[in-house]
Image: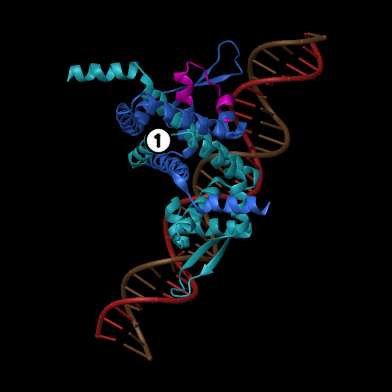
Chain colours: A cyan, B blue, C red, D brown
Amino acid sequence: MSDQGREELAERAEPGPEMEIVHLLRAVVVDLGRSTARFAQRNGMHPTEVRALIALMDAARAGEEITAGRLGSELGLNSAGTTALVDRLERAGHVRRVRDARDRRKVSIEVEERAVALGRSHFGPLIDRAVELLRGYDERELAAVRRFLTGMRQAAD
Amino acid sequence: MSDQGREELAERAEPGPEMEIVHLLRAVVVDLGRSTARFAQRNGMHPTEVRALIALMDAARAGEEITAGRLGSELGLNSAGTTALVDRLERAGHVRRVRDARDRRKVSIEVEERAVALGRSHFGPLIDRAVELLRGYDERELAAVRRFLTGMRQAAD
DNA sequence: CTTATCATCTCGCTCAGCAAGATACTTGTT
DNA sequence: AACAAGTATCTTGCTGAGCGAGATGATAAG
């Protein structure tokens, strides 16, 4: 037990290459957050609105219809907040409400082309840069990055 | 010009292993954000307050004194918002104000031990998991992850 | 000693998000 | 068919984070 304690202490004192990467990942998360906030502000949006658009585009890419309620729970908003959010997005012309034909209580949210283009204009270059970087990687290096990110994703729960 | 357009279209249609990793990184950012939000809520904090604590601990690790003003600009808040933020953190006992002895206009912010422990209780396991994951990596794999993260950080500006 | 500049704080306001409840539609039961 | 219960969204009134403008206190320059 006291050996265990001493080992842990030593581990904290000596950073090592693993800790460097942990801090690097945190820095990436912070910096991407900042970049997203800048994008939001430049376009008169709240960060939550950007998060909503990203969630909507993700769903669209996966071929899923997304309703107001599902969007809200995805973002951790209650129903009132969700309604207000969709109102703002709709007023800004980023999104449109479509009443579901089968279950007319449901409202599915569709992203306007305009919003997709806007998002691409900001995140496109960033994505291009990432792809460019990764093109120089061989199979084992790609696998290493993939494994690390997948592991971090699971650890976040 | 139309050839260019067709090529671009083809590139979007065929994702490739690079795009998979880009989406994975985005997912990690989103999931870590969610995890941070959960931590904030469980402890009755606003996300901004958590961001502030992280910024303060970063500064402390780097051995820098951080003033109210510097913290505010780090977080993109104006002076009024910064004062309110520090008020809340101080009231919750996460932080204390210390008037600078040399320039008595300045107020440097110091993190209480309690807040450090709280942060460790949530992010500690996540960090441990990351270190554990990376222990299995050889030098080239570590370098690949490091290069990718560093590149993404630079691209975020 | 006066004026300019800087760091922080105070005041009044705006607006995102919450809690509670209303409205509209669907499904199951008798 | 009629009614009750459940589900999805919207409405209302409120709390509180953050902003703009300006006050206060401290330092620096003339």
- Quadrant of the snapshot with the C terminus of chain B: top right
Residue visible at 60% across and 57% down in the picture:
A94
Q: Which residues are magenta?
A: B56-72
* Residue at (57, 40) in percent of width and height: A37
Q: Nearer the viewer, residue B20 or A67?
A: B20
A92, A66: nearer the viewer: A66
Q: Quadrant of residue B61?
A: top left
| Overall secondary structure of the magenta section | helix
Q: Position of residue A81 (x, y in %)?
A: 50, 55
Q: Considering depth in this image, is A68 or B78 the residue closer to the camera?
A: A68
Quarter of the view holding residue A128:
top right
Q: Amino acid at mark 1?
A: Val
> In the shown orientation, is residue A152 left or right of residue D12?
left
Chain letter of the residue beneath label 1 in the structure image: A
Q: Residue at x 52, y 60 (%)?
A: A83
State the count of labels: 1
Residue under label 1: A145
Does residue B135 belong to the magenta stretch?
A: no
Q: Quadrant of residue B70?
A: top right
The vertical placement of B99 against B92, above or below, is above
